[in-house]
Image (tube, rainbow, N blue to C red):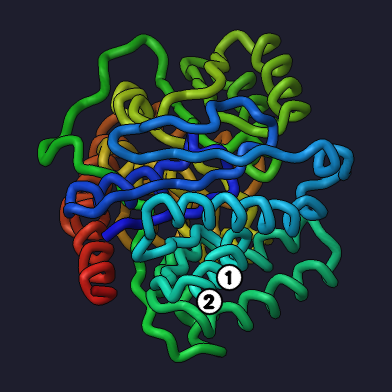
Amino acid sequence: MNVLMLLSNPFTHDPRVYEEATTLIRAGHKVSVLAWDRNKKYPAIESKDGINVYRVYNTKFMNLLPFDIFRLHFWWRLGYNKAVKLHKKREFDVVHCHNLDTLPIGVKLKKKFGISLVYDAHEIWGYMVAKDLPKFWANYYLKTEKRLIKNIDGFIIAEDKYADYFGSFTDKKMVSILNCKHLFSNRYIEPEKKTLFSLIYIGTLTSARFLAELIDVIQGLDGVKLTIGGIGKKKFVNFLLEKCKNTKNVEFIGKVSPNKVIDMTLKSDAVVCMINPNVFNNQIATANKQFEAMVAGRPIICTKGTRSGEITKQERCGLVIDYTKEALHQAIARLRDAPDLCEELGKNALKAAITKYNWKIEEKKLKNLYNSLK
């Protein structure tokens, strides 16, 4: 089948979309990704490991608008028009929408061309934006999603826990495909012997990830080194960079290629994943860090009241703590001073990856879904 994936980012650092696209290509499908590059940083057309990537850019008018939420409807129009042009050149059999902010395009394409529509809910979008937008906007998008879901043919959710929410208003069959990673090894690999106990965080750089507080904690700990990498909004990234420069045992490495994350995690002793338990999405959605730590066989430090904390406790693969500096300080010191505990938790993490949480398991579910669309 010829598949068009729709994505509201420029498709440079989105491992979930990449894994799904390459899985479908290996299964014999053709995959194109139509992506929204807000800042016009990347080529309009390129090929990426067999994926045909097409990007659309903001118009001058869109750039005058203060927030992306105001640009969203214009992106839907631009994305739809570009998709129609691509379809006329080589007809698509399936349009695969990643998140609610692409679903309106997919629904219009289905209605115009009669092609199959797959909805891939990475999160519950209305709840995700609720932390940054007035309640009116969040409710608007929750209602929009309920209305549009009636049109879909295949329904993917990125977390088992989402089934309770979506099942409250639709009887569509849901397939849970987690953001699991490829197994690196079936054998536990010890961390490199180092003078300092090494922690790592590579991911979204935002204040909600407790990163500024993490740096403060590291500053007061002996025998520990922290590496921070990832991407985020410029203002916060610059703030972090300055904070790291003034902390001798913290290294800021900026943007990291997705194919290097696991290797860097293997070279570390533990992974930090402090996310705010008061955000509803964090209570029901597993963080990517969880699965990276698992396949690398490294213990994770995460917060109580989150989905990551729940899984960590179930699998006994890390420390689950309060969302405070004091608790984080104690957890890091505990792992630093107990190499046997680190190894035990790391081996539990790898066992969980081998038996439950790896991409080989998830890709079978994706292939089966697509086979059902034929």
153 or 177: nearer the eye? 153
Does residue 200 appear in this view? yes
Tag count in the figure? Answer: 2
- Which disc, if any, is residue 108? 1
- Across and down, in percent, residue 193 comes to 27, 14
Q: Dot 2 lies on which element?
A: helix
| Residue at (38% x, 74% y) in the render | 154
Q: Is residue 193 above or below residue 133?
A: above
| Residue at (42% x, 50% y) in the render | 89
Quadrant where the N terminus is found in the figure:
bottom left
- Across and down, in percent, residue 241 comes to 68, 17
Q: Callout 1 environment at 10 Å: few (<14), some (14 to 19), or many (20+)?
A: some
Q: Is residue 91 above or below residue 45?
A: below
Q: Amino acid at mark 2?
A: Lys
- Which disc, if any, is residue 111? 2
Q: Amino acid at mark 1?
A: Lys
